[in-house]
Image (cartoon, rainbow, N blue to C red):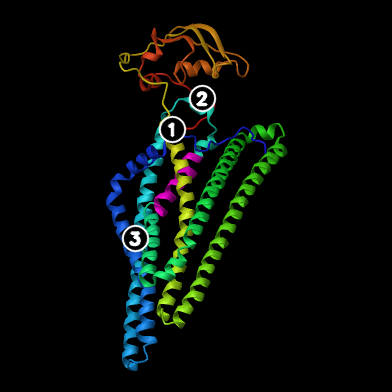
Amino acid sequence: MRDFGYDEEGWSGSQKERHIWQRILGYSAKYYPGLLLALVLSLLVTGASLALPRLMQLGIDNYITATALPTGERVDGLGMIALIYGTLVVVVFLTGFLQIVILERIGQSIMHTIRQNLFSHLLKLDLAFFNRQPVGRLVTRLTNDIQNMHEMFTSVLVTVFNDFLKLAGILVLLFLMNFRLALLLSLFVPAAIGITVVFSRLARQKFRAIRQQLVRLNSFLQESIFGLRVIQLFGRQADNYSRYVSLSQEYVKRTLSQIRLFGTFMPLTELMSSMAIAVIVWYGGGEIIRQQLTLGELVAFLSYMRLFFQPLRELSQKYSIVQSALASAERIFDLLDTGMKIRSPERPAASTEITGSITFENVSFGYNEDEVILRDISLDIAPGETVAVVGSTGAGKSTLINLLVRFYDPGQGRVLLDGIDVREFNLQDLRTKIGVVMQDVFI
């Protein structure tokens, strides 16, 4: 596929993963009480969820199959089990709801802070930086990349702990209930983990490819809409439409590739779960016949195995979310770390009344190192003098203004205002003393 000049870096490796996590956690520091509360709620959700199959076992073994007990006592016992079961279901619902609200609030607050910091930083960067960056890429930083990080805060940071806790709890309960059957089922664990790891790595590549293509698409759309007048003037609508279709088709292709991967992994996980259930029915049924296992324990085993494969599916997806978020976080932090070359001096010239004397002294400048726009330009403009600079497009007329207000620094020579090099002025002070009327009006 043609690149059309719009590219998106993957994980460049400019920042180590540990350093990225430190910066992410730095943004989370003021929300630690909320995160701790979400963690406690996660423990409650996990504990209540794991207690439900156990209650089913007690109801079956102690009351449903306990024919020796009086009927009234069995019914009353089942009623109590049902009451406890219903109470735990309500606990799971309420704690899960509260946990989601807390995490969403924290995630939105952190993303708001990062978004504000990023936009504030962009406003201060040199114009030379924006000459090298497609606008679509910068928009993606403020939108898609921020959203990727938001998903990590709301669906990963605490809930991953919840999933690991659930997996460990299920294994412990299975071994406590019936060691031999649990040992047989544990043979499925390495295969399930292996499938999850392979899927996670493949999913990371698919998600990254989708992000890269999305940035190309955003960049092309932004520049096409911004330059629509030129496109129509030169009759390039069909060509631009063709390029857009090509970019869009590649995006659909990459998205469908990711969908096929998920479409393979999910049924494969269900197959593993069904095979485990088949083993439970075969071996557990034999144990019941030999009176080595109760019917309630068999039902609990079946329920726990259904619960066991659910976190594995979720962990693989959350791993992909983490990788996507870390790649986005790295690009965001790289942008936040981008320095400014055009700065005010530590000791700026004293702010005085400007008379208006302007001097260009042997100035040479180029936006690119290999392309010089101005070469050895010298110019003196006296206070009150009116000067018109005339030239063809690209001759450097606007460049003179850009150098005067110090959007750029000359490669050679000096620009003087009242005999003082403009690099000696405070930037804000310099630009407030010079009135510039541009062709395009934004303010």
In this view, the residue in front, 416 or 44, is: 44
Q: Is residue 418 visible?
A: no
Q: Position of residue 132 (x, y in %)?
A: 53, 27
Q: Quadrant of residue 1 in the image? A: top right
**Vertical arrangement, residue 170 with respect to residue 341, above or below:** below
| Residue at (34% x, 60% y) in the render | 42
**Which amino acid lies under the numbered mark 1 shown in the image of this protein?**
Leu
Q: Is residue 304 visible?
A: yes
Q: Secondary structure at mark 3?
A: helix
| Residue at (39% x, 65% y) in the render | 170
Q: Main secondary structure of the magenta part?
A: helix
Segment tinted magenta in the rendering: 140-156
Residue on which disc 2 sits: 438
**Vertical arrangement, residue 112 with respect to residue 188, above or below:** above
Residue on which disc 1 sits: 122
Residue on which disc 3 sits: 42
Q: CA distance from mark 3 to mark 1?
A: 38 Å
Q: Is residue 366 magenta?
A: no
